[in-house]
């Protein structure tokens, strides 16, 4: 007898635990930061007795099996990645009927100084339009990784002028955990049994 597939195992768990919130966590990533954050959110919510399925955007599950969707994307040119944008547009009706939480991963939230903080608080127009088109429950922007290697001198100067400090992993895991806690509270999930360790 063959072992069950991941989907079959998920469906079997859902049948035996119908009272648990069913959450899909879907992400579109370029360099891995968004995937790491999505995995962290998945582990946190699963640790609070939710039934969670994690998938990259190209293998997104059937939405009919879920009550809640957490969708994350890297930011490129002040917008979600094309795969994430297409996903929202192609599933707009389904998403509008579900509890949807959006997050993005980019440079903006890591900027400091008056100009940088102002820029980091602005929701890019294309992302705001996408968010509003499905009446998402919430949208949050997180910093990702920003490596110095391969960055032009002009881009490095602009980064400094905008209040950029250092390079490398700029993710604020306390902020990510706090946002995940907000999702858990909204779904009335119990407190976690253990603490998830971030990458």
Image (cartoon, helix red, strand yellow):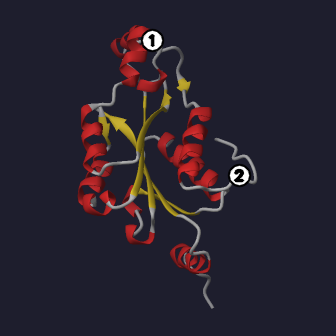
* Residues at marks 2 and 1, CA–CA distance in whole angstroms: 36 Å
Quick one: SS at disc 2?
loop
Residue ID for mark 1: 163
- In percent of the image, x 57 and y 54: which residue is there? 42
Residue ranking furthest to the bottom: 1
Q: Of the residues under marks 2 and 1, which one precedes in the sequence?
A: 1
The foreground one among 47 and 108 is 47
Q: Residues within 10 Å of mark 1 (few under 14, many from 20)?
A: some
- Label annotation for residue 174: none
Q: Which residue is mark 2?
A: 192
Q: Identify the residue at image location x=52%, y=14%.
A: 165
Q: Left or right of 123: which side holds 112?
A: right
* Quadrant including the N terminus: bottom right
- For image coordinates 41% across by 43% down, the residue present is 138
Q: How many marks?
A: 2
Label 2 with label 1: CB-CB less than 8 Å: no
Q: Position of residue 193 (x, y in %)?
A: 75, 54
Q: Give the percent coordinates (x, y) of residue 170.
A: 54, 27
**Which one is closest to the eye, mark 2 or mark 1?**
2
Question: In the rendered image, which quarter is residue 37 located in?
Answer: top right
User: Is the residue 125 above or below the residue 64 in the image?
Assistant: above
User: What residue do we see at 54% from left, 55% from top?
Assistant: 187
Rendered view: 151 above or below 86: above
């Amino acid at each position: 007898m063959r072992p069950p597939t991941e989907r079959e195992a998920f469906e079997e768990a859902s049948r035996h635990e119908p009272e648990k919130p069913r959450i899909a966590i879907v992400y579109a990533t370029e360099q891995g930061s968004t995937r790491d954050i999505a995995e962290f959110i998945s582990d946190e919510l699963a640790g609070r007795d939710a039934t969670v399925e994690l998938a990259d955007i190209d293998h997104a599950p059937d939405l009919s099996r879920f009550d809640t969707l957490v969708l994350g994307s890297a930011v490129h040119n002040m917008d979600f990645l094309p795969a994430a944008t297409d996903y929202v547009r192609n599933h707009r009706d389904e998403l509008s009927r579900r509890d949807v939480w959006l997050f993005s991963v980019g440079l903006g939230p890591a900027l400091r100084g008056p100009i940088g903080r102002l820029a980091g608080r602005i929701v890019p127009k294309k992302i705001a339009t996408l968010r509003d088109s499905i009446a998402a429950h919430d949208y949050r922007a997180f910093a990702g990784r920003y490596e110095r290697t391969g960055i032009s001198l002009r881009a490095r100067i602009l980064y400094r002028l905008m209040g950029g400090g250092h390079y490398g992993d700029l993710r604020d895991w306390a902020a990510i955990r706090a946002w995940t806690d907000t999702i858990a509270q909204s779904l009335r999930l119990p407190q976690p049994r253990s603490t998830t360790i971030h990458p």
